[in-house]
Image (spheres, rainbow, N blue to C red):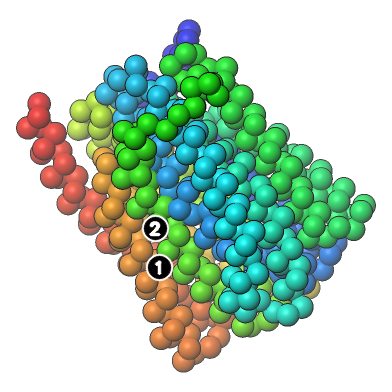
Amino acid sequence: MKSGSTKNELDMTHGSLADKMLLLALPLMATSILQQLFNAADIAVVGRFAGAQAMAAVGSNSSVINLILGLFIGLSVGANVVIANLIGAGHRNRINEAIHTVIAVSFIAGLIAMTVGLFAAKPILTMMGAPTEVMNSAILYLRIYCLAMPFILLYNFASAILRSKGDSRRPLIALALSGIINILLNLLLVIVFHLHVIGVATATVVSNIIGSCLVLWFLMTEEETFRFSFQKLRIRKEYLFSMIRIGLPAGLQGMVFSLSNVVIQTTVNSFGANAIAGSTAGQNMEFISYCVINSFGQTTVTFTSQNYGYGDIERTKKVFRLSLLIGLGLDAIVVLLFMLFRVPILHIFTTDEDVMVFALIRATRVCSVHFLIGTYEISGGALRGMNHSLLPALISIFGTCAFRLFWVFAVVSRHHTFETLMLVYPVSWILTGIAMMTAYLTIRKKAFAALEKRG
C-alpha cells in the first residue's frame, strides 16, 4: 500500500505481483463469502424455524433476483475497468469526474431495478410455476426484497470504485457490519416475532441500507482524486459510454445467464417443494466456491486493466497465469472440503430427510466439480481488462445459457429426473471453459501485437 494521500491505493503496475494480487483478492473473497454466509443464514433460519415451505419461498427467488439485478451489476464491472484504466494510464485528473458518473448511474439503476421487481414479482413467479403452497410467501418476500435494490446497487458500484484502485478491505468492513446486523435481525424477527419470510426480507433491506451508506461515506472521506460529493453528481457521456461499452455485454450476459437459471429453477419447481428446498440448501456450497473464483476473476479484471493501460505486456500475461494458478488451486481445496463434510454442512439448513435427498444429489453432481468455472471466469476477466467485453459475454451466453436451455428442453424433457437436470452444470462449464480460454489466447496475441506497434 502507498502512504500519504493514497494510503488505500495499491500500486499494481510496479513491483511484485502475487502478494499484491492476494491483497486485493483475499478481502474480495472474504467479502463475497461473508455475503453468501449471510444469505445462507437467511435460508438456515427459515429452514430451521419456519419449515421447508418458507425455505422454498425464499430459495425460489434467488434466480429471479439475479435476473433483475444482472444487467446493472454488469455495468459496475464497466465502472471498475474505466477507472482502473484511467489510473494505469496516469489520467488522475479525470478520475473524479468518472467516479461521480458511476455513482449517479448507480442511483438511477437502483430505482429502475426496484420498480421492475415490485411490479414483475407475481408474473415472474407465476410463470416459473412456483408451487401453490409457497407462491404467496415467495411473492411477499420478493416485493420486500426489491426495496433493498437501490442500496444493493449503490454498494456494488461504490465498491467497484474502491476496487479499481486496489482497496477491497473497506467494502469488506461495510459488508461485515451489515451482515452481522442482518443475522441479528433475522433471529429477532423470525424466532422472536415469528415473521418468517417477512422478517428475513426486512432484515435484508435494513442491512443493505447500512452497508451501502457506509461505503458511500468511505468515498466521501477519500483523498481529493477519489472523493465523492453530492454537489458534483453528474453523468458525463464520455464515462457513461465507456461503462456501457464494457459493462453492458457483461450485464446482458448476467441477465441471460440468470434467465437460463430461471428456466432451470422452473424445472426444479416441477419436482415439488422438497426439491426446491434441497436444491437451495445444496446451492449454498456452490455459492461459497464461486466466491473464491469470482474474487480472482475480479482481481484479474482490475490488475489487467491497470497493466494493460500502462502498456506492460509481460506483466499483463503474468496476471492471468497467477490468477488461474492460485484461483483454481484454492477453489479445488474448498470443493474438496465441502465434499468431505457435505452431510453435516447440509444439516445446518435442514434435518428433513426428504429434502436431504435432493440436497445430496446437487452436492455430488454440481459442487464436486465447481472449480471448473475458473477456466472461463478468469480468462473472461482478462479479456474485459483488455477492453474486450463483448466476446466473453457471447461465449458465456452460448456456452452456459443457450446450452442449458437446450439441455432442459431436449434432454430433461425426455429423462425427467433431478439427477439429469443437475448434470447441465458441469457439462456447460467444460464447454464454456474451452471456448473462453481459446478466445483469450487468440485475442491476447492480437491485442499485444497492436500494443507493441503503438510503442
Residue with the mark numbered 2? 253
Task: Tell me: 439 left or right of 431.
Answer: left
Q: Is residue 300 visible?
A: no
Name the residue located 73 percent from the left edge and 80 percent from the top edge. Answer: 132
Q: Please name the amino acid that badge 1 sits on.
A: Cys
Can you give x and y, in whole percent of width and height, for residue 165 in the image?
A: 42, 26
Residue with the mark numbered 1? 401
Mark 2 and mark 1: span between their CA atoms?
9 Å
Task: Tell me: 340 left or right of 93.
Answer: right
- Locate residue 428: give its quadrant: bottom left
Q: Are marks 2 and 1 in contact (CB under 8 Å)?
A: yes
Q: Which residue ends up furthest to the right in the rendered image?
A: 192
Secondary structure at badge 2 equals helix
Name the residue located 48 percent from the left edge and 47 percent from the top edge. Answer: 73
Q: Please name the amino acid that badge 2 sits on.
A: Gln
Q: Is residue 123 visible?
A: yes
Looking at the rendered image, the quarter that the C terminus falls into is top left
